Image (cartoon, rainbow, N blue to C red):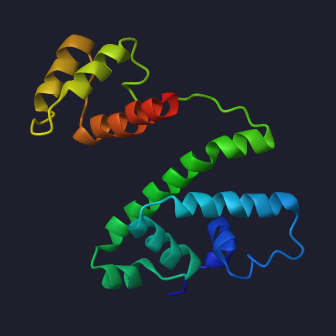
Amino acid sequence: MAGRIVFLDWIYEVGSQNVFGQQGKSKLQKEIIAKVREAVESLPADERDFISMYWFEGKSLKELSELLGRKPHKLDGMNRRIIKKLKRKLAKYVCEQFGIVEQEVSRCIICSHPERKEIDRILLAKKADETFRPIYKLLSEQFGLKISTPQILIGHIKYHINSEEQNAG
């Protein structure tokens, strides 16, 4: 089985020690490298370590699975989540730097609902020891929302409500 060709990936280029040699780099390239490094450094330690081993050192998911004691498919999911997180962290910079107008396209069924504020209030009122089951029923009956998994609600709280509160504060 052929090995993964990591040197073609942008994240590898940014993390590679050879690339950090600043000779011959334009000001923009240096700035991009610094922003990506800053975004990676802002990740929690376990995610930063994973990125370092997987992208910069080129370890396979199988190797990491043995090393970290986690199943390869779980590590693959972790990788996708980390890349999404890095994209979110770098989105504002990319939009400003390259004049890209970010279009608000919400795939979240809660964010696009006309009564979102009321739904958010209900979600935030949930106590830590309660399940989401009664909220499913309420959202279905009162707002016509069909929620299939708690991850939809958790993701909305984590990435939409909490991130908006952080941006406002």
Regarding residue 149, the answer to whether it shows in the image is no
Of residues 113 and 53, the one nearer the viewer is 53
Q: Is residue 20 left or right of residue 151?
A: right
Of residues 16 and 146, the one nearer the viewer is 16
Residue furthest bottom as drawn: 1
User: Residue 47 location, x and y as percent?
Assistant: 43, 65
Q: Would you place residue 4 above or below residue 80 in this image?
A: below
User: Residue 97 location, x and y as percent?
Assistant: 78, 44
User: Residue 62 location, x and y as percent?
Assistant: 38, 81
Q: Is residue 155 left or right of residue 5?
A: left
Of residues 24 and 65, the one nearer the viewer is 24
Q: Which residue is drawn at the image coordinates 47% and 58% (left, top)?
A: 82
Regarding residue 155, the answer to whether it shows in the image is yes
Q: In this view, does 116 lie to the left or right of 166?
A: left
Q: Which residue is drawn at the image coordinates 57% and 48% (left, top)?
A: 89
Q: Would you place residue 80 above or below residue 148 in this image?
A: below
Residue furthest front as drawn: 169
Q: Residue 91's image quarter?
A: top right
Q: Which residue is drawn at the image coordinates 33% and 34% (left, top)?
A: 157
Of residues 104 and 49, the one nearer the viewer is 49
Q: Which residue is drawn at the image coordinates 42% and 77% (left, top)?
A: 61
Q: Would you place residue 141 above or below residue 89 in this image?
A: above
